[in-house]
Image: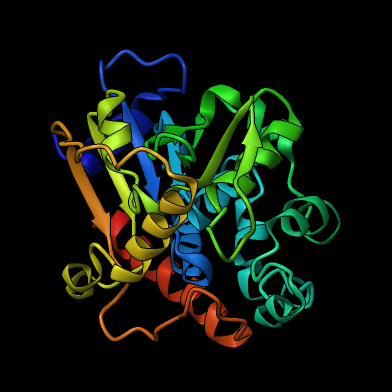
Amino acid sequence: MTVLDALRARIAAGSTPGARSDGLRIALSIEGGGSRSAYSAGMAMAVEESGLLPAFDAVYGTSGGGLNAAWLLSGEGLRWLPSWGWDAVLAERVVHPRRALRGGVVVDTRHLVDRVYSDVTPMDFAAILDNPISLHPLAVDAHTRRVADLSPYLVDAASVRTALRATTALPLLAGPPVRLAGREFLDGGLAEKVPLATPIEQGATHLVVLRTVEEAAEAARRGSRAEKWILDAYFTARRAAPPPGPVVPGTAEVLQIWVPEGSPAVGRLSNDGPLISRAVELGRDAALTALRA
């Protein structure tokens, strides 16, 4: 059964999260990438607009994709997911390269979750915890270099906030690792850029994957030298264990929704509001087309 057939069958049957009878586990996987996450934000909006969200059992997100996953499960995704490009959000200077000249962080994720997600675009953390569709932000264990699913640690609003900081804690840009449940974590995109292996290991039979790059660009960016250098430099400085061997995922039906060919490039640290908002629109349109096919 294809991914879309499985989703539509659940909607037609009135199936609800936590009370399934089809033996499937259907997950939504959201890629991040700093400001480029605007593309997957628009795609996440389309999932909700299409009426398919209740057919999913879990939502996985890495880095900015983890933020989009949280918005989607807060019940207010259509209201707040477009905020990636809003002036009020950009004015908070969550991304501000010049802070590094004063010894600060380039990406202030603490300010994002403690100030922006409280006062500018309030995130309903209680709704996320109450949602029967489970949230799975992915991070990297700062001591083992292994991917970690932070879902088991989400027990209250404070832990959700901390997990969102952890999944976006890029070394050299966002400061030290984020501590949660007695462990330290880094940006999940350094080890599992696209949440794929983890949901399949956890039993996903069907996956919708929201991407932040064009399909043609995927081969060129896989194994980014810059990101590998950042990760290796960080762990070398800490004299940590060598990286674990590659994880070979099992099998699942997968539908990937890509950024449309010829779309504008959005840098990880971009603060260009109109460009970012355009990326949201393009991502939404691409996903609506794919989900209605």
Whether residue 51 is visible here, answered yes or no, is no
User: Of 82 and 192, which appears nearest the observer?
Assistant: 192
> Would you identify the image quadrant in which residue 274 lies?
bottom right
Whether residue 1 is visible here, answered yes or no, is yes
- 243 versus 47 height, above or below: above
Left or right of residue 172: residue 106: right
Give the residue drawn at x 34%, y 47%.
192
Left or right of residue 131: residue 133: left
Give the residue drawn at x 79%, y 72%.
92
Q: Position of residue 220 (x, y in %)?
A: 19, 73
- Quarter of the N terminus within the rendering: top left
> Would you identify the image quadrant in which residue 75 lies?
top right
- Quarter of the C terminus within the rendering: bottom left
Give the residue drawn at x 26%, y 22%.
24
Q: Position of residue 108 (x, y in %)?
A: 70, 63
Of all residues shown, which one is farthest toward the right? 119
Left or right of residue 249: residue 16: right
Which colour style is shown?
Answer: rainbow
Q: Position of residue 71 (x, y in %)?
A: 61, 49
User: Of 179 and 68, which appears nearest the observer?
Assistant: 179
Q: Position of residue 156 (x, y in %)?
A: 73, 26
Give the residue drawn at x 68%, y 40%.
162
Counting the numbered discs, the total is 0
